[in-house]
Amino acid sequence: MTQPLRTETTHQTTPQTPDSLRILSIIVVVLLAVVASSQQLPPSAINAEAQGRAIIAHLNSVIQFYRTVNQPIQKAGEPNDVVYRDQAVAQSMQIATLAFQAAKAQAELSAVSNAGSASAASSQQERMQTALAQADQRIASLQQHEAALDRQIASARAADLPSLKEQKQQIQSALKLNSAMKDALERIIGTTTAGGGTGLAANVDRLERSVPELQSGNKTSAPQMTTVQSALSSGVVSQAGVLFQLLEASHTLNTLIDEDNQLNRQAADLRSPLSNIIRGLIQQGQELSQAAEAPAPPVKTHPAHPQPSPAAPQPNLDSITARFKAVSAASVPLSQEVIVLGQSQANLAAWQTSVQREYTSIFHAILLRVLVIALALAMIIGGGEFWTRATNKYIRDLRRRRQLLIIRRVVVGFLSALVVLFGFVTQFNSLATFAGFITAGIAVGLQTILLSVAAYFFIIGRYGIKVGDRITIASVTGEVIDVGLVRFYLMELAGTGTGLESTGRIAVFSNAVLFQAGTPLYKQMPGTGYAWHELVVKLTDGADYKPVVEAIVQAVQGVYGGYRANIEREHEAVQSWMQASIAMPQVESRLQLSGGSFQLWTRFPVEIRHDAETDEKVTRALLDLMASNPAVKAAVATTPSIQPSVRG
């Protein structure tokens, strides 16, 4: 049983070395062939390498032109601009389609010229696939033998085990070698397949796949455009935006026209060698046709001279026809492309003319609107200047003049802001949103200033304050020397007794102080310049008070009589201005019991600007009365006192 087993095993394992060497030699040959083929350039009647580079460059330019045309070029214009745009897109798609048709035809023409190189590459691929299949078959056969040996080892005797194990080891080595060769072949084939093909045809296919729109035929929708009529009725800001959009569109159209001219030159250069070949083929065809129609001349032979050798095979009409069809398949699309490029250039030129016309109309509208704004502002400023001069000329009251000038500034500023706003801005929806946020920020950040501005209109109102008024606010008494939009100024007054003098300091208050609780503002009644003072005389218990009171009151009335007319005149003016009945100021007297003593209280009006002089006159009159009338002197218990009824 051992000898047949050995014979079978030897018969199956000994042939493995020549097959393995043969497969390995195939791998080496394939590698050398791949390297050699990459270093050879097939000959061609036309410089195939330069022509291929020109074709790829032309296709790249066509794709760039197509992409640019399909982008939104014009965002504002007339409705007919959409027609120009759609026509430009359709023409760019037609140009790209024709360019790829011509490139594919030229690639096929180049492939016919390079048939030898293509067949060599194909044979190399076939040899590699055959070697890979043989390696797979060899590996499967070795695996079967290994499985058979495993079964024999399991049932063999101890004496046969060493030879069986040695055979198994040889088969395993052969399996490793064949697996390594299979991996090498698969890597080579995988690299060749992953390259996706080389040459002009493969490059053209890759470029065509980068523009899937040409295959699907999907058209991009035209973008929504702002019409020129709506732009003409807009503000300067919107018109300026449309103007810049039209300028950008004109620049893009200039670029497209230049690219169109460049594509036209490239297509003409690509067509030129093909046209030369076609003219040569036509000439050969005409010559062959004429030769076929003419009778053949007799051929004379001379025995002394040998017969000439047969000439090389001449082209016939069938070969010329086949060649003409192949070349015209590449030349005709290029000619069509040149024609469509000319149409596209005319369309782009018309589109650019339309954009230039729209640009001019918008530019003139902007100039006109700016001129109208300038005239309106000039009229407002001129009216404000007339208002100022008329106020200074006809208004004598300084307070009223100041108020009118402030109103003039507000009116001029408001009207100017309206003119600028309506002249430059028309998108009021966005403006309202933006103004809402701005107003909220201003209201929070400038709260005090806004209150001061609001209080200013109360201050200059009917019962407000004016320069020269004496007021008391926040325990400060003074005369108003200036009233501003957000604050006013007081010249502080202080003193003892009834007289107040300037302290040399200026008190500044915010107008918003009017809205602060606990800070009252005291001022004179509008149109009045008098205050009330009090004369207090303490009397003795046993005095005859009636004649004493009459004498003292008469003395005070005598002093009051010197300026009574001024106070009554002011009172009448105030009563007429307020249109209300007010009691006439006069000297008033009362007898009072205060602190366990009997006293005379006399209240009399005084002019604020002469209050100290009036108090002095009352004091002298009372002293003179006491000196001339012993009864009055005896009735006065202590030194009389004069004080203001209200301080300030």
Image: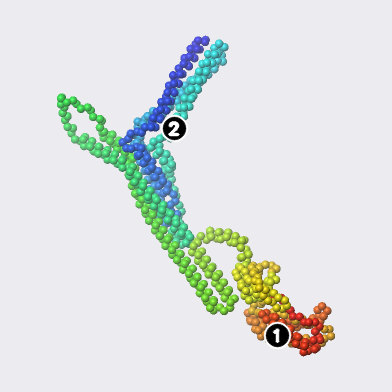
Q: Secondary structure at mark 1?
A: helix
Q: In the rendered structure, which amino acid carries the disc numbered 2?
A: Thr
Q: Quarter of the image for the C terminus: give it.
A: bottom right
Rendered view: 647 above or below 12 = below
Q: How is the protein colored in the picture?
A: rainbow
Find residue 639 and report its horizontal and vertical position in percent: 78, 82
Residue density around tag 1, few if under 14, some if 14–19, many if 20 or more, within 10 Å:
many
The quarter holding residue 121 reads top left
Q: In the rendered structure, which amino acid carries the disc numbered 1?
A: Tyr
Q: Secondary structure at mark 2?
A: helix
Rendered view: 495 above or below 184 = below
Rendered view: 57 above or below 10 = below
Query: Is tag 2's residue or tag 1's residue first in the polypeptide sequence?
Result: 2
Residue 218 or 326: which is nearer the viewer?
326
> Who's the residue at 41% across and 41% down the image?
208
**Which circle marks residue 492 in the picture?**
none
Find residue 531 and report its horizontal and vertical position in percent: 69, 79
> Who's the residue at 43% across and 43% down the image?
211
Q: Residue furthest front?
A: 504
Rendered view: 323 above or below 495 = above
Q: Residue furthest right?
A: 542
Q: Residue furthest bottom?
A: 628
> Who's the residue at 43% across and 41% down the image?
210
**Which circle marks residue 560 in the picture?**
1
Q: Which residue is mark 2?
A: 193
Q: Is residue 455 left or right of residue 97?
A: right
Instruction: From the image, state whether disc 2 or disc 1 is nearer to you.
Output: 1
Alpha carbon separation for disc pair 2 and 1: 126 Å
